[in-house]
Image (cartoon, rainbow, N blue to C red):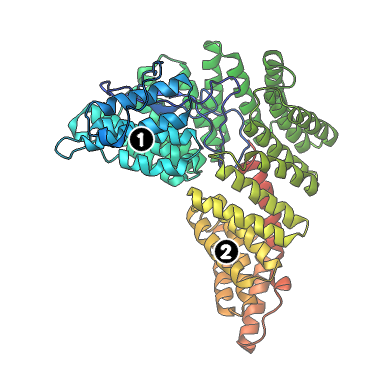
């Protein structure tokens, strides 16, 4: 599913299967882990191995039995007139499961499941649909998803969750929980993270009411929801849920368990995203110790990569190199020299050597990683290749080679554009491309790229994130260069509102938007509005940030000019936008692009 963090399915994970409920949900609500394809991937394809035990969110699901193979039944038994037979619904539902298990194809199974749901609906006792109807609708939705028809699955599941009445007992709670989680997954595959999270919350609420707050199965759902919040860059919510998961596992699991290790890896990712690197390092060390105790060599190597990332962020470069080299040795011996895990470590080393001024070594590691991605080993996913290319493009950006960075981003986007659940990831890549186009002076293409990214982020529910505010600001700057002043003002205004809420008025990104908005108002002849913003910014700097920042003198000078101009003539023609856009705007653009490289698209 799940932006900032994109989590990927390991190459050796079993393929995604259609799973359907057993004939009767007589088991209590349970949460088993099922490996699934990434839901994501978020505004970034860049993930290092995720804190989860696998690098994909394990879906808390129901206890479902496997479908049994049966020989094909006689045909011509199924027609609309016979659907009111109460024995036909269970028979058709069983046929749907058997058809899926036999590999005959989802289209035939879909026909059986649709007929089963119609039969259950016609045979409702006293007009009240049975849980069999809900179960058949779950099967219909699962088959739609396997066919890539996620939009058609949504109304089916919305209908299914209305059937159970939780107050009637465990069976109804089970059906409701299953429906909400399945609906959340479907919204996630459509890139609608906000709706997805709401469904997961409802499922968790039902599960907690049925099992209590401290059941281990509740912990699995909490972690699942926490990872969804991470993908939506809602780190405070994710932090609270992950802490609850840790508390439950401390009670019900042995010390240094795999469950605790998975929780700590996720907690480390959250702490890293919030800038608390020391706490992230502590969680990773404890997770590594747990994995060592359980003999998970490859997982230990994956954690070593994450530890290297933290050391690099803390400028402890020698320790970072040591961690990366440890991981590299394990990956080469266990997976081979040309595995994407090896390429991923090469990309980390390339970034680290760039930071330490060893540009030749940095470029060499980039080229080695790209050679692996150019000829991927069997089993390598498109998401892995796209993630690596996006990561390396950020390093070429640092080399001041925007054209090369653009080529890699275009290849990455091509790999992901037709993949379900990758809307946020593609949006993140498009935003990066917008920055690159801006840097090379292709402002019209830059604006179009930002516009496409903004549309995807709005649809995915990330329209209130700080990242979305930064993208709006960047799009506004592209509009400025195209002299689309009114559009730029609207974008800066929306960016200001979001960044004030998410980052606070004193954050550097918010101050940059204030400055851009003041310049735009001035260019539109709205002198009083521009003066009001600059006075507010100067007051913030004087009272909270200090006046030592060089931006303070620039803003003070601009305010003096505007006041003087307003005193002479309110109708005086505004200065050209080129002269009014503060140098801080260009600085903000460059700094923001670097922040994206470090925050949104790299680990």
Q: Which residue is mark 1?
A: 114
Residue 10 in the image, given as x and y percentages of width and height: 58, 24
Q: Nearer the viewer, mark 1 or mark 2?
A: 1
> Label 2 near label 1: C-beta < 8 Å?
no
* Residue 584 percent location from the top left of the image: 69, 62
Residue corresponding to mark 2: 491
Exactly how many numbered labels are in the figure? 2
Q: Residues within 10 Å of mark 1 (few under 14, many from 20)?
A: some
Q: Residue at 52%, 62% (x, y): give it.
A: 494
Q: Residue at x 50, y 28 (%)?
A: 36
| Label located before the other in sequence (1 or 2) | 1
Rendered-image quadrant of the C terminus: top right
**x%, y% of residue 313?**
65, 36
Residue 363 appears anywhere in the view: yes
The answer to whether residue 243 shows anywhere in this view is no
Residue 496, above or below 165: below
**Residue closer to the observer: 362 or 436:** 436
Residue 559 image position (x, y, % from top left): 63, 74
Residue at image x 71%, y 44%? 409
């Amino acid at each position: 599913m799940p932006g900032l963090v994109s989590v990927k399915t390991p190459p050796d994970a079993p393929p995604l299967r259609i799973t359907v409920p057993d004939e009767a949900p007589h088991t209590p609500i349970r949460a088993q882990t099922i490996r699934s394809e990434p839901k994501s991937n978020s505004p970034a394809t860049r993930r290092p191995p995720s804190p989860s035990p696998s690098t994909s969110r394990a879906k808390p699901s129901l206890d479902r039995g496997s479908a049994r193979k049966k020989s094909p039944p006689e045909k011509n038994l199924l027609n609309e007139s016979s659907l009111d037979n109460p024995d036909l619904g269970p028979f058709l539902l069983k046929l749907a499961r058997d058809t899926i298990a036999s590999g005959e194809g989802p289209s035939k199974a879909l026909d059986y499941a649709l007929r089963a749901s119609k039969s259950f609906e016609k045979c409702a006792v006293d007009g009240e649909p049975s849980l069999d109807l809900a179960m058949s609708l779950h099967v219909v939705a699962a088959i739609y998803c396997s066919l890539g028809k996620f939009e058609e699955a949504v109304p089916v599941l919305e209908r299914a969750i209305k059937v159970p009445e939780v107050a009637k007992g465990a069976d109804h709670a089970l059906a409701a929980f299953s429906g909400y989680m399945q609906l959340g997954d479907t919204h996630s595959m459509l890139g609608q993270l906000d709706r997805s999270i709401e469904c997961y919350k409802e499922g968790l609420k039902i599960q907690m009411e049925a099992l209590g707050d401290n059941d281990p199965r509740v912990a699995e759902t909490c972690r699942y929801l926490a990872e969804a919040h991470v993908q939506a860059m809602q780190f405070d919510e994710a932090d609270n849920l992950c802490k609850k998961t840790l508390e439950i596992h401390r009670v019900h699991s042995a010390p240094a368990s795999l469950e605790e290790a998975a929780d700590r890896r996720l907690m480390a990712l959250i702490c890293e995203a919030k800038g608390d690197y020391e706490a992230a390092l502590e969680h990773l060390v404890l997770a590594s110790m747990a994995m060592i105790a359980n003999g998970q060599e490859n997982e230990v190597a994956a954690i070593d990569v994450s530890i290297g990332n933290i050391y690099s962020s803390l400028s402890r470069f020698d320790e970072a190199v040591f961690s990366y080299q440890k991981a590299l040795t394990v990956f080469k011996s266990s997976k081979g020299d040309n595995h994407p895990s090896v390429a991923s470590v090469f990309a980390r080393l390339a970034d680290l050597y760039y930071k330490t001024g060893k540009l030749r070594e940095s470029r060499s590691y980039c080229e080695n990683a790209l050679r692996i991605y150019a000829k991927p080993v069997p089993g390598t996913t498109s998401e892995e290749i796209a993630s690596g290319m996006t990561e390396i493009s950020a390093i070429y950006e640092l080399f001041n080679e925007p054209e090369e960075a653009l080529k890699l981003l275009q290849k990455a986007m091509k790999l992901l554009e037709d993949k379900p659940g990758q809307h946020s990831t593609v949006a993140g890549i498009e935003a990066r491309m917008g920055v690159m186009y801006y840097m090379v002076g292709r402002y019209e293409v830059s604006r179009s790229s930002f516009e496409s990214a903004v549309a995807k982020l709005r649809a995915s529910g990330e329209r209130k994130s700080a990242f979305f505010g930064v993208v709006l600001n960047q799009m506004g700057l592209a509009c400025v260069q195209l002299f689309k002043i009114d559009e730029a003002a609207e974008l800066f205004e929306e960016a200001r509102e979001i960044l004030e809420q998410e980052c606070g008025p004193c954050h550097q990104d918010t101050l940059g938007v204030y400055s851009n908005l003041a310049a735009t108002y001035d260019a539109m002849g709205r002198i009083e509005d521009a003066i009001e913003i600059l006075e507010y910014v100067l007051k913030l700097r004087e009272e909270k940030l200090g006046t030592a920042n060089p931006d303070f003198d620039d803003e003070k000078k601009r305010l003096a000019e505007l006041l003087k101009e307003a005193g002479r003539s309110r109708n005086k023609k505004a200065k050209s936008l080129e002269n009014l856009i503060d140098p801080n705007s260009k600085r903000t653009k460059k700094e923001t692009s670097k922040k994206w490289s470090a925050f949104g698209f790299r680990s």
